[in-house]
């Protein structure tokens, strides 16, 4: 982990190359949990159980998609910025993902839909080789405000 400390405004980050074997998804989840736990214990980064759980869910979904749809290597980068973590997964496939319309009858292929629903921010960018998918996850419990509902991408809108 790089950085001098969250209190001083340092950016904490880590990266890992993901193997193509069957353990990549679980390994990425465990690495994310260890990274967040260390950031909390050593640097005082605020971390709720919800933040930990959502980060592991997003890591699992993004790495699953990288392993499923892109041949070759993949890489995961985690970066703490304030009270959020950015999860970025790079893979070798240049095709950008497209979120499908919600369909309760569809079996599978809900991963991107889930990631967008729980993220404060989401982006998909082509790289020189392949693409990078980035999701921003709150590490703290967000206060629920009466009269608002959560929209995909983390934005709130007032209820009518």
Image (cartoon, helix red, strand yellow):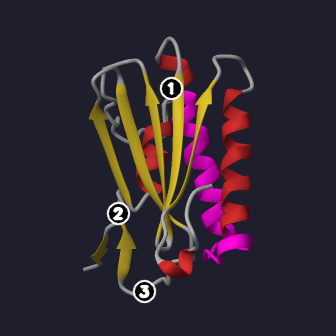
Residue 66 — which label?
Answer: 1
Was residue 51 drawn as part of the magenta stretch in this picture?
Answer: yes
Q: What stretch is highlighted in magenta?
A: 40-65
Circle nearer the viewer, 1 or 2: 1
Q: Give the residue displayed 50% in from the left and 84% down from the top.
A: 143
Task: Check disc 1: other Cα within 10 Å, few if <14, some if 14-19, many if 20+.
Answer: many
Was residue 149 drawn as part of the magenta stretch in this picture?
Answer: no
Mark 1 vs mark 3, CA separation in Å: 35 Å
- Element type at mark 2: loop
- Element type at mark 3: loop
- Mark 2 highlights which residue? 151
Residue 146, percent across and down?
Answer: 41, 88
Task: Check disc 2: other Cα within 10 Å, few if <14, some if 14-19, many if 20+.
Answer: some
Name above or below for residue 43 compared with residue 22: below
Sequence-wise, which precedes: disc 1 or disc 2?
Answer: 1
Task: Check disc 3: other Cα within 10 Å, few if <14, some if 14-19, many if 20+.
Answer: few
- Element type at mark 1: helix
Residue 94, percent across and down?
Answer: 31, 20
Residue 145 — which label?
Answer: 3
């Amino acid at each position: 982990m790089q950085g001098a400390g969250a209190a001083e405004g340092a950016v904490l980050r880590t990266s890992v190359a993901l193997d193509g074997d069957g353990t990549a998804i679980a390994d990425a989840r465990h690495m994310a949990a260890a990274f967040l736990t260390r950031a909390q214990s050593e640097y005082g980064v605020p971390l709720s159980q919800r933040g930990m759980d959502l980060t592991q869910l997003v890591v699992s979904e993004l790495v699953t998609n990288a392993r499923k749809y892109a041949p070759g290597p993949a890489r995961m980068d985690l970066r703490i910025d304030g009270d959020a973590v950015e999860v970025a997964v790079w893979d070798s496939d240049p095709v950008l993902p497209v979120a499908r319309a919600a369909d309760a009858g569809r079996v599978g292929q809900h991963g991107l839909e889930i990631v967008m629903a729980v993220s404060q921010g989401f982006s998909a960018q082509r790289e020189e080789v392949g693409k990078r998918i980035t999701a921003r996850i709150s590490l703290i419990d967000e206060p629920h405000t009466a009269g608002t509902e959560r929209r995909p991408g983390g934005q709130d809108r007032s209820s009518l």
